[in-house]
Image (cartoon, coloured by chain):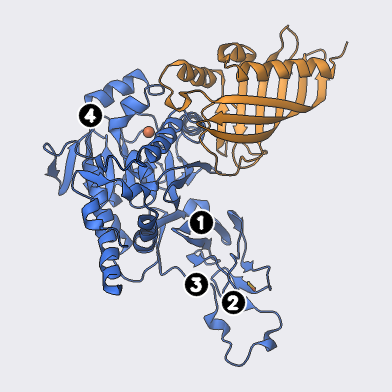
Amino acid sequence: MIPNIDELIQNDLIHRSVYTDPKIFDLEMEYIFNKCWVYVGHVAEIPEPGDYKTTFIGRNPVILSRLSDGEITLLINRCRHRGPIVCQHEYGNSKHFRCPYHSWTYDNSGKLVGVPMPQGYGSTFDRDRLGLAKVARVAQYQGFVFGCMTEDGPSLEEYLGGITRFLDAYAAVSASGKIELFEGVQKCGYNGNWKYQLENGVDPYHVGALHLSAVTPEAMKIYRQGVGCVIAMDGHGVTDHTDWGPMPADAGLSGGFNLVIFPNLIVLRSQIRTVRPIAVDRTEIYTNVVRLSGVPEEVNIKRMRDQELEFGAAGTFFTDDLEIFERTQEGLQSGAVEWLVFARGLDREEVKGGYMTGAMSDETQHRGMYQNWKRHMMAAASSLMAAE
Amino acid sequence: MSISRSQVEDFLYMEARLLDSQMFEQWMDLFSDDAVYWVPAGRDDIDPSRHVSIIHDDKESMAKRVKRLRSGFAFAQDPASRVHRLISNVRILSEDQASGALEVTCMMLLVELARKRQTVHTAFCEFSFDTRKDPWSIRRKKVNLLRNGEVLESTPFLI
Ligand code: FES
Ligand SMILES: [Fe+2]
């Protein structure tokens, strides 16, 4: 049965099945993760020729590589012979990927360059057509690399829309204008839907409540006063605290902005978080920590130490976020109550600078993201209807 | 007289017991003022000034963690995890009687029960002690989790 997508997202209400129905999750993989621009990594993760990173676009395992000419390529990590992934490491440097099963060998641009005992294949065997599949489109903005599984649709810059201005400002905090990263990744998982993390990445309303045990009294005061605003920006979510102060070099809770770039990238403070949906009730978060150029080393170290104290699997903030995501998944199992309420700010939000904008504790940005979700999922509904 | 392995074991069992019994303040008192409490991420041999860790605390950060756990608002520890730590394979690597420096390694098996879910961690632990005073103080505790490169569940208790 096709879930009735149209009815699941009301303007201020979201149906619980959006978070609990495995059929919805399957449709999301196909109609969101296989259609949108999906974040796969930052160029700072693969600085040298031959460097690669493996990751996922929805359910597609992919390899992001830097070729010898410096170009970036994004390949499907799946042997064209009988299907295993050809690269099992998270990061590395190699000009070739060899599938160990029967030793088909590909170069890092995907070309099939080696097949043992090729005479066993007939004359129709065309190795040019059996290279690793390429992700249809790959593009980058401020070094953030995105892949798109479809040829058509908006360009990356069109897709990001107003968010590009914020990414420019984020990169500009570094004196070189370029984002640099500390080595390593913090990885956490929770038994809950991936969209809780998207909502939570731009949710100032919760900071003074859920994070009562961790937030400083000064920051708490600002959150309670509600300085700044939330913006529904081209299907993505923004909390803009620049009224309070610019993006601070020490990455403290004192201004700047949070970005949730639909469907899987969160940029806030010193963190680049990648959201990886595993199942309707399972999600993984991979976090890279940004280092700045042109600041004293102590400032960079403090950015990293604060991030470790507050976020990551043992973080004083993040453990409570992870906890609430799991409790939400548990609560939404109940069919006795159908709807979640996303109504904050409905009667005070207004269009500013071309975007629907709410007060700092409002849910305008969430409503915008779910309208975007709905647009993509409606396409699923209509093509399924046509197929039936 | 040099320090025996059973003296070291007694100390490590006591440290584990303080954590298992949630006696966090007494646990923190075991650490010197310049102590480092470190749980690397990714692998054991990272440089913590270049590579992100799971935990890399000085005493001030440790105090923040403990204060949070005591605040009444640490929702991820309501109810608190129940934890059993088993310590074994204790080895004395070196002892310098003049400076009181003692280097020890051990294995830890940590079983956490929280929200009906039992999570098992194992770790290779490294300790640096200052043994000049009684009780000794911990100058460095490094917990190399077997799964430090994997996706971890929320870990709101002290490791
Ligand atoms: S399956 Fe990869 S070479 Fe045969
Ligand atoms: Fe949070």
Describe the element under mark 3 as helix, strand or loop. Answer: loop
Residue placed at 49% from the left, 28% from the top? A309
The residue beneath circle 4 is A227
Describe the element under mark 2 as helix, strand or loop. Answer: strand
Subunit of label 3? A
Residue placed at 50% from the left, 67% from the top? A75
Location of residue B45 by image quarter: top right
Q: Residues within 10 Å of mark 2 (few under 14, many from 20)?
A: many
Do discs 4 and 1 share a chain? yes
Subunit of label 1? A
Q: Amino acid at mark 3?
A: Ala
Which-is-in-front pick, marks 1 and 2?
1
The residue beneath circle 3 is A133
Instruction: Quarter of the image for the C terminus of chain A: give it.
Output: bottom left
Q: Amino acid at mark 1?
A: Thr
Subunit of label 4? A
Horizontal side of A86 relative to B9 (left or right) equals: left
The residue beneath circle 2 is A112
Task: Identify the mark at residue A176; answer none if there is no mark.
Answer: none
Q: Colour of chain B?
A: orange
Gap in angstroms between the C-alphas marked 4 and 3: 48 Å
Query: Which label's residue is closer to the chain start, 4 or 3?
Result: 3
The reply to whether discs 4 and 1 touch (Cβ–Cβ < 8 Å) is no
Task: Identify the mark at residue A55; answer none if there is no mark.
Answer: 1
Do discs 3 and 1 share a chain? yes
Describe the element under mark 1 as helix, strand or loop. Answer: strand
Gap in angstroms between the C-alphas marked 3 and 1: 15 Å
Describe the element under mark 4 as helix, strand or loop. Answer: loop
Gap in angstroms between the C-alphas marked 4 and 1: 37 Å
The reply to whether discs 2 and 3 touch (Cβ–Cβ < 8 Å) is no
